[in-house]
Amino acid sequence: METVLVVGATGNIGVSAAIAALGSNSNVLAIVRNQDSADKLFKHAGTSNGITVVEADVTSDTGVKVVVDQVRAGKLPAFQHVYACVGEEYVDVPRQEITTERLRRNMNMSFEANFSVYRNSIGYLLEQKDVDCTWTCCTGLQGELGLFALPAMTQGALFSMATAAARENEKTNVRFNEIEVDRDAKLHGVTKASDFANVYEMVLGGRNVRSSRVRVENDKEDLKKLRYQKKF
Ligand SMILES: NC(=O)c1ccc[n+]([C@@H]2O[C@H](COP(=O)([O-])OP(=O)(O)OC[C@H]3O[C@@H](n4cnc5c(N)ncnc54)[C@H](OP(=O)(O)O)[C@@H]3O)[C@@H](O)[C@H]2O)c1
């Protein structure tokens, strides 16, 4: 049985990724902040069966590396897929009021944390040469719209990271993809975590989906049929 490493697993998107993994007959290895967060994941996923949690600070330089080292040492389950969705503040703060401290905090919990997941896990997937591995990250429409400056800027950085990683893995055993979600589609009740899980299930199972941006906007069809486009 395969395992998906989910980072940011206790949030809206992460819970749906965990549900998708379980629904794809895979196990989940979730990096969580603490036991309270783990309990949140179990509650929203509706089960703890098939989910292994490990505590680490993914915003630190070495948090993810320590986890992957434990996997390599056989102390945690081996994984073949990664889903990174550590979140930032989703708030509307005028640009001139964004302090350096707040900007750094958000870049750290969004861009740096998700990049750290990539840097510390991609080598492990590449080593599994003959296995169909995937690496997926979640970005958002704010990065294009720029209505909420703070999440827009962190998502913009993630877009570039995703494009670079998509190029880097175009011919490897790792299918790198970005899922761009319109947050309002969820907020307006169009999407539940369990509905949204279907998107990641299709990415996991879709061997042709590679180096692409998958779009999930205000259209229920996006949850049934993948709408994706090569990133370059
Ligand atoms: N939800 C949407 O509709 C949507 C739409 C577009 C894009 N996205 C993007 O997807 C990503 C996740 O969104 P979300 O809605 O799932 O966010 P969320 O519900 O706020 O979850 C964020 C996740 O990141 C973790 N996290 C946040 N700050 C952390 C920190 N300082 N240290 C360690 N862990 C931290 C949270 O852990 P705890 O549970 O411990 O707090 C949680 O697992 C974001 O980048 C967001 O922009 C989401």
Image (cartoon, rainbow, N blue to C red):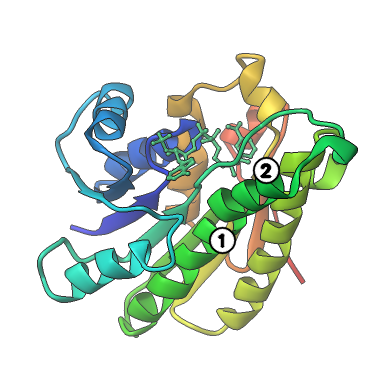
Q: Is residue 42 left or right of residue 59?
A: left
Which residue reaches farthest right? 96
Q: Quadrant of residue 160?
A: bottom right
Q: Give the x, y percent position of residue 81.
A: 37, 62
Mark 2 residue's CB less than 8 Å from ligand 1: no
Q: Is residue 166 above or below residue 9?
A: below
Crowding at label 1, few (<14), some or many (≥20) Cα neighbours within 10 Å? many
* Secondary structure of residue under mark 1: helix
Q: Is residue 142 left or right of residue 28?
A: right
Residue 204, can we see it? yes
Nearest to the observer: residue 55 or residue 126: 55
Q: Quadrant of residue 91?
A: top right
Q: Give the x, y percent position of residue 12.
A: 48, 30
Nearest to the observer: residue 232 or residue 62: 62
Kind of residue indicated by mark 2: Arg
In the rendered structure, find residue 102 and report the number of the disc placed on it. Answer: 2
Q: Which residue is mark 1?
A: 112
Q: Is residue 36 above or below residue 106?
A: above
Q: Residue at position x 26%, y 34% from top?
A: 38
Nearest to the observer: residue 137 or residue 226: 137
Q: Is residue 135 above or below residue 166?
A: above
Q: Give the x, y percent position of residue 76.
A: 15, 61
- Mark 2 or 1: in front is 2
> In which quadrant is the C terminus drawn?
bottom right
Tell me the distance, in whole angstroms, between the alpha carbons under discs 2 and 1.
14 Å
Q: Give the x, y percent position of residue 41.
A: 31, 31
In the rendered structure, find residue 33 and report the number of the disc placed on it. Answer: none
> In which quadrant is the N terminus drawn?
bottom left
Kind of residue indicated by mark 1: Glu
How many numbered marks are there?
Answer: 2
